[in-house]
Image (cartoon, rainbow, N blue to C red):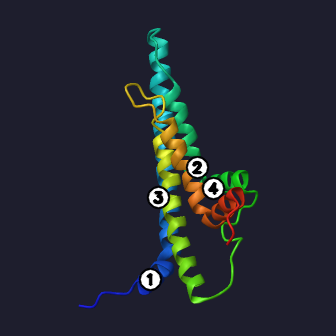
């Protein structure tokens, strides 16, 4: 049994990346729809509880589910909006250098970082969907860290440029 080289591993990942991205988009769409249906059902229960007794119930969890469900359902639009707000452009591959073997390997590593960023973005919205849940942990900071970190990772080349210009790095 032969062990594939790192270059072969990176090449295989770059070939399967579009399909993995489509899988994540489809998964986020289904998760978003599930959250919207769950929020609608919980709003129905909330309305029934409010008409029967004047209890001190909280509507925050349902609102968080709706916001997270909408962001996951419209994931490409949410990514577009967050990317434009942070970087001023929407194409994560806008900045590319010369075409050498290192550049090709670096591009594939960048694709992997973008994939991890997409996972973090989706996970951030899943964490934010638990806000307002009674007995739940306050997770706004953790969720927003995943969302913003995911956007920064999805735009790794812009993030590198941003930090290099902010800290005066040459390269």
Mark 2 — residue?
148
Marks 3/1 in contact by CB < 8 Å: the verdict is: no
Which residue is most to the bottom?
2
The earlier-in-sequence mark between 3 and 4 is 3
In front here: 157 or 143? Answer: 157
Which of discs 2 and 3 lies nearer the camera? The answer is 2
The earlier-in-sequence mark between 3 and 1 is 1
Which of discs 2 and 4 lies nearer the camera? The answer is 2
Q: Residue at x 64, y 61 (%)?
A: 159
Q: Does residue 33 appear in the picture of this structure?
A: no
- Please provide percent x and percent y for residue 30: 48, 54
- Please provide percent x and percent y for residue 165: 72, 60
Mark 1 — residue?
12
The earlier-in-sequence mark between 1 and 4 is 1
> Which quadrant is home to the N terminus?
bottom left
Q: Is residue 78 left or right of residue 147?
A: right
Q: Does residue 12 appear in the picture of this structure?
A: yes
- Please provide percent x and percent y for residue 125: 51, 46
The earlier-in-sequence mark between 2 and 4 is 4
Q: Quick one: SS at disc 2?
A: helix
Question: Pointer 4: residues within 10 angstroms few (<14), some, or many (20+)?
Answer: many
Vertical order, 165 against 135 (above or below): below
Mark 3 — residue?
27
Which residue is most to the top?
54
Q: Is residue 1 left or right of residue 89?
A: left
In front here: 170 or 105? Answer: 170
């Amino acid at each position: 049994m032969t062990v594939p080289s790192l270059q072969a591993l990176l090449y295989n990942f770059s070939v399967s990346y579009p399909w993995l991205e489509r899988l994540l988009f489809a998964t986020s769409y289904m998760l978003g729809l599930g959250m919207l249906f769950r929020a609608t059902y919980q709003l129905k229960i909330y309305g029934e509880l409010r008409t029967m007794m004047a209890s001190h119930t909280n509507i925050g969890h349902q609102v968080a589910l709706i916001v997270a469900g909408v962001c996951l359902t419209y994931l490409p639009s949410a990514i577009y909006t967050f990317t434009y707000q942070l970087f001023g452009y929407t194409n994560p591959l806008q900045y590319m250098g010369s075409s050498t073997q290192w550049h090709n390997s670096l591009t594939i590593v960048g694709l992997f970082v973008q994939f991890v960023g997409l996972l973090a973005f989706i996970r951030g919205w899943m964490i934010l969907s638990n806000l307002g849940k009674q007995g739940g942990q306050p997770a706004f900071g953790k969720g927003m860290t995943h969302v913003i970190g995911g956007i920064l990772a999805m735009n790794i080349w812009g993030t590198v440029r941003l930090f290099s210009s902010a800290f005066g790095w040459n390269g």
